[in-house]
Every structure is written in C-alpha cells, then in structure tokens.
Amino acid sequence: MRLFNFFLSILLFLFSLSLKCQTSGNQMVLWYRQPAADWNEALPVGNGRLGAMVFGNILHEKIQLNEESLWAGMRIEDADAEVREYLPIIQKKLLTGEVKEAAELSEKYLRSNPMRIRSYQPLGDIYIDMPDTFRSMPESLSYRRELNLETGIATTTWSYEGITFTREVFASAPDNIIVLRIASSQPGKLTFKLSLSRTQDAVVMPISENELIMTGQIVDLPAREAGPSGLHMKFSAILHGKIKDGAFHTVNNSFYVEQATESVFYFTAATDYNPSLLNFDGTIDPVKKCSEIMSLVKNKPFETVKSAHIVEHSSMFNRVHFSLGGDFKKDLPTDQRLKLVREGEQDPGLTVLQFQYGRYLLMGSSRRPAILPANLQGIWNKDYEAAWNSDFHTNINIQMNYWPAEVCNLSETALVLSDFINRLREPGRLTAEKTFNSKGWTVNHLTDPFGRTSISDGVGWGTFPMAGPWLVLHQWEHYLFTQDTAYLKSEAWPSMKESAEFVMGFLIRDKNGYLVTAPSNSPENTYRLPNGEKYNLTYGATMDIQIIRELLNACVKAGEILGVEKKLLSQMKSVLKDLPPNRISKRYGIVQEWIDDYEENEPGHRHMSQLFGLYPGTQITQAQPALFEAAKKTIERRQTYAAKGQGSSTGWSKAWMINFLARLKDGNAALNKIFEMQREKTLNNLFDTHPPFQIDGNFGLTAGIAEMLLQSHTGEIELLPALPDAWTEGAISGLKARGNIEVEIKWENSLLTEARLTAKDDRMVTVKYGTRKVKLKLSKATPAILDRNLRPLIFQD
C-alpha cells in the first residue's frame, strides 16, 4: 500500500506539473497603453457588493462607484392585476383560437399597477486631479493600465522625470471595502486632490481630518407607470485617507495631498435596503453601517488588507486553470489583440482570457458580502436610468448570468441567487393567486430588489409565468453539482415544490387533452396567423412545456432523494404524462416554437426559446435523433435570417448559440460563434455588448467554452464533446461535473492524452470520450487518472 501511495503521489505531481506548465504562460491580465476613452474601456473591480470602474487617466482620473442595492423605486404591495374572474375567459379564447379577443381582454385585465419599475443607480465617483506638469508628459514614458484577474487588482503606472507613479484599486471581500493606493518611487513626489461626489440626491462633507462622508436619499420624480414618486432609499458612503510623508488636508468634498510618498484610501458604502423586507427600511442607518465597516479596517496597514484580499480572491479564481497551447500574443495590449481578431486573425489566448474574465466578473458581482444577484450589468452601472433599468430580467438574462457558476467551480456565487429566489416566494404567491388563480409562487419576465413578480413592461411579452419555474432549476443544479443534501432540503426543495404547485394549478387541458399553460408567450417573440395578425400572447408555448418538464422531473428526483411528499410526487408523474410533446415543424423541419405550427414573424429572432430543451435543459440530446437534427435546423434557420437582417443577434444571443452548438457536438461551429462575439459584440475592456453593455453575454461565453470541453447533463461525464479542430493542444483543470466531481483534461494533436477525476465521496460514474465509454468507481478524494483510451493509469476498485 505504501508503494502504491508513493507512485500515486509521483503521478499526481507530474500530472499537476504538466497542467501548470501549460497554463503558467497565460498570465490573466487585461492591459493597455492608454487611459480609457470612455466607460466601456474602463476596468471593473468588485467584491459582490461594491463595484468600481477604473479609467486610468493620469491628469484627471475617474473611478466610478456602485453599491449593489442602490435602486430607485420602492416595494409596491398591490401591483398584481386581479384577474381571477376573467382568466378562464382569456384561457378559453386562446384555446379556441380567438387570439384577438384574448389579447384585448388581457390588455384590459392583466395590466399591473404600475407596469414599470425604476432603475439601478450609480453610487458616485472618485476624481483624482494631478498637477498640470503631467499634461505635457511624453506618451513614450512607460504608461500601462492593467487588470490582473488572478489578484483582482487594477493598476495604472507611468513614469515622469525618472519617477514611477503607481495607482492600485481593488475591491476587498474580506474587509468589505474598495481600496485605492497611490504611490511614487521617490519620496515626497505626490501632490493631488481627490474628490468624492454624486451628481444628484447626495451631499459630501468632511467628518474628521481624514474622512469624508456622503449622505443621500433618492428622490423619485413622477414618471409614467413607474410607481410612487417621493423620498425613497437612503444611502451613505465613507472615504478614509492616510498618507506617508507630506501634508494631508480635508476640505469640502475633497482631500488635498501635498508632497507625499504614498497615500491609501479605504472606501465603503451602504443603503437602508433590507433584503428580508424586499424594501428600504427606516430602522436601518446607512451611516452607521458604513462606520461599523470602516471602524474594523481603517487602522489596518495597506499590505495587510491587500494580502487578505489576494488570498481570498485568488483562492476562488485559481480553482480553474485553462490553456490552449501558449499565449503568443500576451505581450500585445488587449485592445490591439481584439483589433487583430476583428481583422480576421485568431487568438486562442484571448479566448482563454475571455473565459476567465467571465469567471472574474461573476466573482465580482455575486459573492459574499453580496445580498443581491448579478443584474443585467453585473454590479457595474454609470447611468441613473440604465438600459432596461439594469434589472433582473428573468426570461433568460439572469439565468444566463449563472450558467458558469457550477461548472466553472464558483458554486458559492449561485447561493446569492438562491437566497434571492427564496425571498421572491412571498410576493410571488400573490402573483400566482391573483393573476393566475393558482397556488404556489411565480414571477414574470423581470424583477427588482423590491420583489416585483407581477406582469411588467407590457402584457404581450411581460406575461411569462414560467420565469419562476426556470429560476428554481438553478437551485436544483446547485444540488446536482454540490450534492449538498442539507441545502436541497432546506433551501431548494421548498421553493421547487411550491413552484411545481403553481404549475400544476395553472395548467389547463386543451382540445387534444394535453395540459398546457395559458396565457403565456415564447419570450419576446411574435407569431403570425394566416390572416396576417401578429401576437405575443399564446398558450402552451414550447419553452413553457420544456421548463415544466424539467421542473417536475427535478422535483420527483429531489422528493425521492429526501423521501418526502409521495402523494405529490405521484401527481407530478401523472402531469408529466399529459404534457404535449416537443414537436417538429412540418414546414421547416425545425423545433416548433408554439403549440401550433405558426409562421414566425421574425425568423432571425434573438431568442431561441424552443431550444431550452437543448440548453440549459436536458430534453434534446443524441438519444432523440429527430429532435437533435431539428435543433440543428432551427439554429441554421435563425442564423440565415439574422444574417439577412431579418432579426437581431445580440451578444447574449450569440453566447447562447455557443452553448447550443456545444450540446450539438459541433465544436467548429461553436468556435465560429466565439469569433463572431469577439469581432462584433466585445468592447475594448472585453465587456459583452447587446448593444449596449450587458453582462450576460460574458457569462454565457464562459459557460459555452466550458460546455465545449466537459458535459455531464445526460448522466455521463463526457470529455471534449465539442473540441474545435483549431484547438489542437490544451489543458483545463478545475471544471466541475454533476455529482461534485472535479475534472482535469489534457489533450495534444486534438486527442485526449490524460484526464483526472476527483469525487468528494464514493460514487460510480460513466466517463465518455468519443465512442469510448468506461464505468468507474471513484473513491472519496482519490483521483482517478485515465489515459487517451480511458484506461486507468491510477485506479482503485
């Protein structure tokens, strides 16, 4: 046994060394030779709760700030339409083809009050004004702006008259602050003014010789269909400064530093938002919250704070290492690399960087101390009225935000979403009862921190009661990847069960005896009737049924694992038998989007909702060859029409396509879609653009690349299922398969060379590569290393 352990240790060491050698050349850094020209070139840092965008300007630096819960608006207790009396009439008309009458009744009775929400807002800005002597600084003097993904530190450096100046910015999760350090390489060479400001609803003033405080309250003016106006959320921020050498003055909203060698600033912020109330709370004092955070950190040395931050950040980020050979263009600035890709060059190293950037952004917008999930812009937003309010869009966008969470070994980020889902259950029960005449809970196509679950924006596309069932599937996925039975019992099962109760109470029988949803829509898409009329509103849309099938199957499995609710599980099984099947269009051979084979009004539409069953669902696989081929044709048709301009293809839509193509085992097509995203939908700071900036595309891209290299949704662990021809050499470690199994893969000449699987407990697994399959018994914490033929190099029965 000792001899076995000795050889086991040697082989594991060599395997790990081999992976590290392949990945060590890929320094995960975005860098530039010039400051950001605008917000879309600034570099993001975040700790889940606080975010900052760093521009890197020498003379007039700007650091734009966010706090996750700073939103306009308020909780509205009675927004849901009271439809119970009219719902059966609307349903009957939809089922009998009287769509116009159903739509008219829906517009009259399904409208919430108000119909719109208000926006996520920026917190403010830090400005740094340097002496005018820097204005004439030659460009050749070593300016560099970078974001190191492994450390989470944004750094700006430049030289002047033999002096090197350095600015570092990072968002510390352990200390719950944003940190700014400014230093010169020679003593006494720092003179500058640093200001804290917000353009509306706030004042900034000194509270001590080395602290500024911001206090504010959002003033919501009357706005059409946006809810009550008035004095709403309160907020505060504290900026603490200290220097080495020189003089330090506090005046108005600024610090004035003279002839210092180093200066360090700690920043924190808070609001009176109470997540348990889904509202702001007058008993919460944001000034006190800020003071409590600052009192714990302000006397800590900078190096102590920085070291704690790097340890915490890198311990998460470095769980996954990825290489596609060598990064031969890492010495080029990131914007130049992107420019070359736009001109037709390939850059595998940039793809690796974007993959890891997605993980970095998820860490920055959805880890403790966060209490809210990543929104449409993660946590980074400069606008008081942001695009789509930077809200939580629940008809794909917030779901896409969390696609990489489990497979990319960031499971704790999904807990922030899970907590939010469970808080939505309370208002969602009222929506289920009043609008859909059902038990349980649900939410429609968007929500906000105030627990909006009613129909919003418009009846036609706002009526999407399957958003709740889709959301709870993320809780089920968290269990599948972590095997945390305590979480399943206390957090996931209650919301999953209640969501299933909503579905079973909402379903009605159509003329063919199937159980269908009514009313609903296929997200944001429109169909055309033979008479030329166009509608969103429908019944039994394909996505609805696919989501319900996923939900009820998940609930049956969860209930059996927990040994609960046998009668309810039996009812779920009966409902599953009466759902309509996935259909293939007789006209086009595609997966049918609606329950009838309607003509698509926009054949190149950005949403491809009928392929939910392909990804992220599990219903369209190679085990259903007809549907599998129809899914391919669906994508071909969408792309053909989008290319003709008869539709739109957003950044997130292309990212979803990568995941589809990975599930279809078409690595080359998936890689082409990555190229499209890089050339058309990637900003210079590597943010995805809808346009405008929308972070879901970043997360979808990362998830798609992971899906190309590892899949486990069918019950098998498949290695390199969609490896493109161009990725001839590579290695990835730290990805997770369902079953809480960590996977490392290495390949050369487009062929697997080694794989390593490590389980957290004893379990049987089936591993697949190409046409080969092998069943393995994994022992707890004992890696199994397989060769290119899936033969164990190290394996214990």
Image: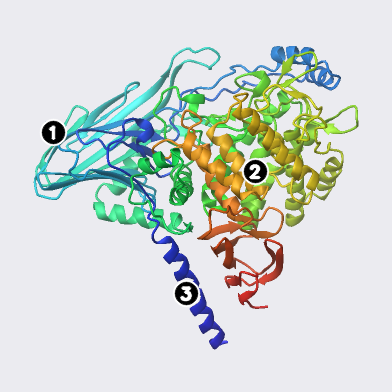
Query: By what rule are the colours in the image chosen?
Result: rainbow
The residue located at (62%, 21%) in the rendering is 78
Quote the CA–CA distance across marks 2 and 1.
52 Å
User: At which x and y percent is residue 661?
Assistant: 64, 45
- 164 on left or right of 419: left
Residue 750 percent coordinates (x, y): 57, 60
> In front here: 380 or 272?
380
- Find out whether the residues at labels 2 and 3 contact each other: C-beta distance under 8 Å: no
Q: In the structure shown, which secondary structural element does the residue marked by tag 3 occupy?
A: helix
The residue that label 1 is drawn on is 136
Name the residue: 72% across, 52% down. 558
Q: Name the residue under label 2.
A: 660
Residue 24 drawn above or below residue 660: below
Q: In which quarter of the image is the C terminus?
A: bottom right
Q: Given the image, on which type of amino acid does mark 3 rest?
A: Phe
* Secondary structure of residue under mark 2: helix
SS assignment at label 1? helix
Q: Nearer the viewer, mark 1 or mark 3?
A: 1
Residue at the location (18% across, 46% down)?
183
Q: Name the residue under label 3.
A: 13
Q: Local crowd at mark 2 within 10 Å, few (<14), some, or many (≥20)?
A: many
Q: Nearer the viewer, mark 2 or mark 3?
A: 2
Q: For this rendering, which residue is in front, 490 or 626?
A: 626
Q: Residues within 10 Å of mark 3 (few under 14, many from 20)?
A: few
Q: What residue type is labelled 1?
A: Ser
* Amino acid type, residue under disc 2 in the picture: Phe
Tags 1 and 3 in contact by the CB under 8 Å rule? no
Earlier sequence position, callout 2 versus callout 1: 1
Give me the C-alpha separation between circle 2 and circle 3: 36 Å
The numbered disc on residue 279 is none
Badge 1 crowding class, 10 Å Cα cut-off, few under 14, some 14 to 19, many 20 or more, is: few
